[in-house]
Image: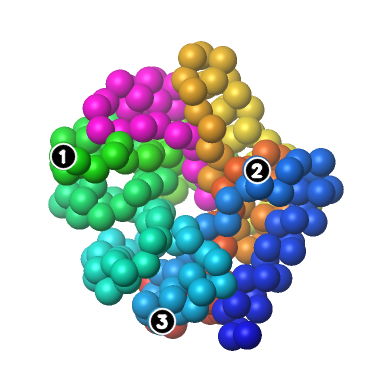
Amino acid sequence: MTTIQANLQTVRDRIAAACAAAQRPVNDVTLLAVSKTFGPESVRQAHAAGQRAFGENYIQEAVEKIALLADLPLEWHCIGPIQSNKTRLVAQHFHWVHTVDRLKIAQRLSEQRPAGLPPLNVCLQVNIDGGATKAGVAPADAAQLAHAVAALPHLRLRGLMTIPDPVDGFEAQRALHAQATQLLQALRADGLPLDTLSMGMTADLEAAIAAGSTLVRVGTAIFGGRQRPA
């Protein structure tokens, strides 16, 4: 067993334990392996251990990696910031986008999604804890953006993604993530058929699952530290 395969099993055990503690079925939570800065061979090792969904932050790097791994049935998630000049690459190559925080970006993704591909799955990135310099739509503005994005063709609005600043302690982490859960519930009550909460990473996945996360984004605990600076 490779190190990556062993690490994956450890993370899966953590997810299973967190689901049991929260009295949730383990298949309620998807593991997204964050493979940014790691090469195709690392992804192949993870795939050999049963991992299918991979998250990438750097779009150009990801597109090259996707091409090199086209022989594998992988699901690619864009979890990094998207500039207007990169929307076409994202629309062409990814299955999911977690970082939509402006209508302009969503419109470009919709317009540039190639004919013949299924709708692009989209999450709104929400600045849930109000960081002044952080990406993400403010919670108070999320409903307006969500309804606008949901009306676009070639996109399927799935839910919310958050990257809150780290806080100490399980209960503090859970309470912070619970704010996103409450926002998702409010959007559902407003008529949007959302099913995805992308929240929780290596350090806080247990608290995120306790709060209702349906997708955790884990990189370091699977692949180790980054191989080059961001």
**Element type where label 2 sits in the image:** helix
Residue 41 - label: 3
**Disc 3, SS:** helix
Local crowd at mark 3 within 10 Å, few (<14), some, or many (≥20)? Answer: few
Placement of 41 over or under 199, stated as above or below: below
CA gap between label 3 and label 1 equals 31 Å
Among the two numbered marks 2 and 1 on one chain, the one whose residue lies closer to the N terminus = 2
In the image, which residues are magenta? Answer: 141-163
Report how far apart the C-alphas of labels 2 and 3 lie in the structure.
29 Å
The residue carrying pointer 2 sits among few (fewer than 14), some (14 to 19) or many (20 or more) residues within 10 Å by Cα, namely few
Residue 168 drawn at (x, y percent): 74, 56
The residue that disc 1 covers is 115
Residue 92 x/y as whole percent: 21, 51
Question: Magenta stretch: residue 127 in it?
Answer: no
Q: Earlier in the sequence, mark 2 or mark 3?
A: 2
* Residue of label 2: 28
